[in-house]
């Protein structure tokens, strides 16, 4: 593995050198034109097996140094395709909160099920059992403190703890799915402990259809 | 919150309350970066003005303002003001006239090493408009006009011309490419929707690059800045790692394993993608060879591992693991061997990023219940706290020259992106639009 990385580094360096010399003779264009204007829509090329070449390519906007008699450099706008923010259509929700399903709350930095949360989950389990066709999604949420990344992991731990608890209460694991929203979808937007407590939650929703 | 001190007042009006957002004003005892070391002699540089050579009145002044800020942020130059030295600003023309020579002599006599000046014009003909800018450089060491640059383009690249010229100055005096043309990706939030956006390194020219209508999180650049990788909630229930090519808007889902797929990091050569996925249970680190698609698991333990960041030589990774309870920063070789813990102070250390010169790692540290930025050497020495005060700081990201960091700081309902020198000086707010901007990532190439 190490050797592989090293070999590639050398290959990349020589490629970059070729690229640089090739570039100097190419043109005085800097930055480049943004001719392609395809909107960045989700879904395009969503084949997870595809991976475009991410090897380093020279940008074509290298500095050329101060010149005694400067020739004109055309400065192109940095390349960014345009996206239409109005294209962001609200998604169809295939899920609904159920008044019968209660949120369960967690301690700071914790994903342990408290006694109170356990009682709530027992009631939730009864409802899920009596609605035998219901598919339930368990969302794990966090308060705003801490990093976005670690809160995603923490939120997943909470969601999975809830799932495991429900499975122990006799719910089929195939009826339960989990997702973590970290601190990205708070239910309460104040910045104090009562609100933080409300955000550290496992939230259960019923999925309608498959 | 009570003590509000105004710093970094510049012509454009980028003012900020240092007390309110927390800057470590002293105490930056350990400074490793040569350009910020006490014995590093900054090069004294004066911008003698960008004259208007036709076009709107603001033109030259605007370019001059952008250029001056770039020069200051470079940390290579000490920006001096000629009038404050008693030197009258005059049009310097080609630098060959006797007026210009008199200014150069006075400047050199006052210890100014470099004098920069120029002119700019904007011509409109019908719907077309064209900006021309010329910058010239006098060097007191050789006592001559050492050269210049001429730029042409449409008015939308006005700032970019100034950035480009600033980077040429840095290049001339350090051999480094400068940072003024670099970009920062980040997350912009509208209500509960989060999308990826890109802005210039100074906060201008912000553009949204996704419009999915739900959650796109934590962007990271490819090493050459052609691509952004980020976590995308394709449906509301799956978190994949997506990649977008900025020039075309073309988009790929590159990791879709089920479970949580987060914190992508391409290796410095662009050929390996390190990321965290929970598809085999808890969050673990994996390495994907982007050419063969071979996937290798790097961590094996019943706890959360995430947030990999490559050493600049591509041989090691720093990452977060909560294998000891709370999250801590660890190091390992790029093949998953030789794992060792880096942080021991405090019970919450996360979001590590390896500096481009390899000698430091910045991360989020929890100190007295506040989430601030800390810096540590990869050998565990020289830990220092970079930011202080209220606000939840997150997502540190190094500038390509290793002299600055960007990060987000959340105070009550507002979250904005800030730049800070690697020694804790010169805190500068970069985002002013909207109320919630977060998760900045600095493009690693100039």
Image (cartoon, rainbow, N blue to C red):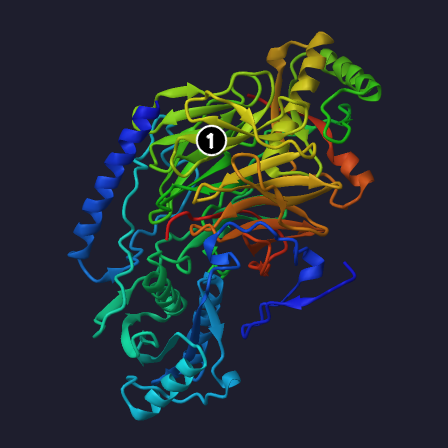
- Residue drawn at x 61%, y 32% is B343
Q: Nearer the viewer, residue A133 or B46?
A: B46
Which of the two residues, A156 or A83, is positioned nearer the viewer here? A156
Q: At which x and y percent is residue B335?
A: 41, 22
Query: SS of the residue at dot 1?
Result: strand
Q: Is residue B348 visible?
A: yes
On screen, B115 above or below B418? below
Tell me if B266 is positioned left or right of B409 in this view.
left
- The count of marks equals 1
Residue at the bottom extreme of this rendering: B98
Q: Horizontally, is B262 left or right of A137 in the view? A: left
Quarter containing the N terminus of chain B: bottom right
Residue B366 to residue B78: above or below: above
In this view, the residue farthest toward the left is A25
Residue for point 26% across, 35% down: A10
Near mark 1 (Cα within 10 A), the count class, few <14, some 14-19 or many ≥20, is many
Q: Position of residue B63 (x, y in %)?
A: 42, 74
- Residue that label 1 marks: B317
Name above or below for residue B213 compared with residue B150: above
Residue B230: give x, y in percent of width and height.
Answer: 48, 38
Quick check: A199 left or right of B30? right
Image position, residue B263 (x, y; %): 51, 34
Depth check: B344 or A151 in front?
B344
Residue nearer the viewer, B80 or B243: B80
B394 left or right, relative to B222: right
| Residue B192 visible in this rendered orientation of the protein | no
Query: Residue at point 48% right, 52% down?
Result: B33
Q: Name the chain under label 1.
A: B
The part of the image, by quadrant, that contains residue A7 is top left
In the image as oriented, which residue stretches furthest toward the front?
B39
């Amino acid at each position: 593995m190490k050797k592989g990385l090293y070999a590639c580094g050398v290959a990349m360096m020589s490629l970059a050198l070729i690229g640089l010399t090739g570039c100097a003779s190419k043109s005085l264009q800097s930055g480049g034109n943004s001719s392609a204007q395809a909107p960045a829509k989700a879904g395009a090329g969503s084949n997870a097996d595809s991976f475009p070449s991410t090897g380093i390519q020279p940008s074509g906007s290298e500095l050329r140094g101060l010149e005694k008699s400067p020739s004109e450099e055309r400065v192109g706008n940095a390349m960014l395709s345009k996206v239409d923010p109005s294209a962001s259509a609200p998604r169809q929700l295939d899920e609904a909160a159920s008044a019968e399903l209660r949120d369960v709350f967690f301690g700071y930095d914790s994903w342990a099920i408290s006694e109170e949360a356990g009682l709530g989950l027992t009631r939730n389990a009864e409802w899920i059992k009596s609605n035998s066709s219901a598919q339930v999604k368990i969302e794990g949420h966090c308060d705003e403190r801490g990093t976005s990344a670690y809160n995603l992991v923490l939120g997943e731990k909470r969601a999975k703890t809830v799932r495991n608890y429900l499975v122990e209460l006799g719910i089929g694991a195939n009826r339960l799915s989990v997702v973590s929203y970290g601190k990205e979808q708070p239910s309460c937007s104040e910045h104090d402990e009562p609100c933080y407590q409300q955000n550290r939650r496992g939230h259960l929703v019923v999925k309608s259809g498959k | 919150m009570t003590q509000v001190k105004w710093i970094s007042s510049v012509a454009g009006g980028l003012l900020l309350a240092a007390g309110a957002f927390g800057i470590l004003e002293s105490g930056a005892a350990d400074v490793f970066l040569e350009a910020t070391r006490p014995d590093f002699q900054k090069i004294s540089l004066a911008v003698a003005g960008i004259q208007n050579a036709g076009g709107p009145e603001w033109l030259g002044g605007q370019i001059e303002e952008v250029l001056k800020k770039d020069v200051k942020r470079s940390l290579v130059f000490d920006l001096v003001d000629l009038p404050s030295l008693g030197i009258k600003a005059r049009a310097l023309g080609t630098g060959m006239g006797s007026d210009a020579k008199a200014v150069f002599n006075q400047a050199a006599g006052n210890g100014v090493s470099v004098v920069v000046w120029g002119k700019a014009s904007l011509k409109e003909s019908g719907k077309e408009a064209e900006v021309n800018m010329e910058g010239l450089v006098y060097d007191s060491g050789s006592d001559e006009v050492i050269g210049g640059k001429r730029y042409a383009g449409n008015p939308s690249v006005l700032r970019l011309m100034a950035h480009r010229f600033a980077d040429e100055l840095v290049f001339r005096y350090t051999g480094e490419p400068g940072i003024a043309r670099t970009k920062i990706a980040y997350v912009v939030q509208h209500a509960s929707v989060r999308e990826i956006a890109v802005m210039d390194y100074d906060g201008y020219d912000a553009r949204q690059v996704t419009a999915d209508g739900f959650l796109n999180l934590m962007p990271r650049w490819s090493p050459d800045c052609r691509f952004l990788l980020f976590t995308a909630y394709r449906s509301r229930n799956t978190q994949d790692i997506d990649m977008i090519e900025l020039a075309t808007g073309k988009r790929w889902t590159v990791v879709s394993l089920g479970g949580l797929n987060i914190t992508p990091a391409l290796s410095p050569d662009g050929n390996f993608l390190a990321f965290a996925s929970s598809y085999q249970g808890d969050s673990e680190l994996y390495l994907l060879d982007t050419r063969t698609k071979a996937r290798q698991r790097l961590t094996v333990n019943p706890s959360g591992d995430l947030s990999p960041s490559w050493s600049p030589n591509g041989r090691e990774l720093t990452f977060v693991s909560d294998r000891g309870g709370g999250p801590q920063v660890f190091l390992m070789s790029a093949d998953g061997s030789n794992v060792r813990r880096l942080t021991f102070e405090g019970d919450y250390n996360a979001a590590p990023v390896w500096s481009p010169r390899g000698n430091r790692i910045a991360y989020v540290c929890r100190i007295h219940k506040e989430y601030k930025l800390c810096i540590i050497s990869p050998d565990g020495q020289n830990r220092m706290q970079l930011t202080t005060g209220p606000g939840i700081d997150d997502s540190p990201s190094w500038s390509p020259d290793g002299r600055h960091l960007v990060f987000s700081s959340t105070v009550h309902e507002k979250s904005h992106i800030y730049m800070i020198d690697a020694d804790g000086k010169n805190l500068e707010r970069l985002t002013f639009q909207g109320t919630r901007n977060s998760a900045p990532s600095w493009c690693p190439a100039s």
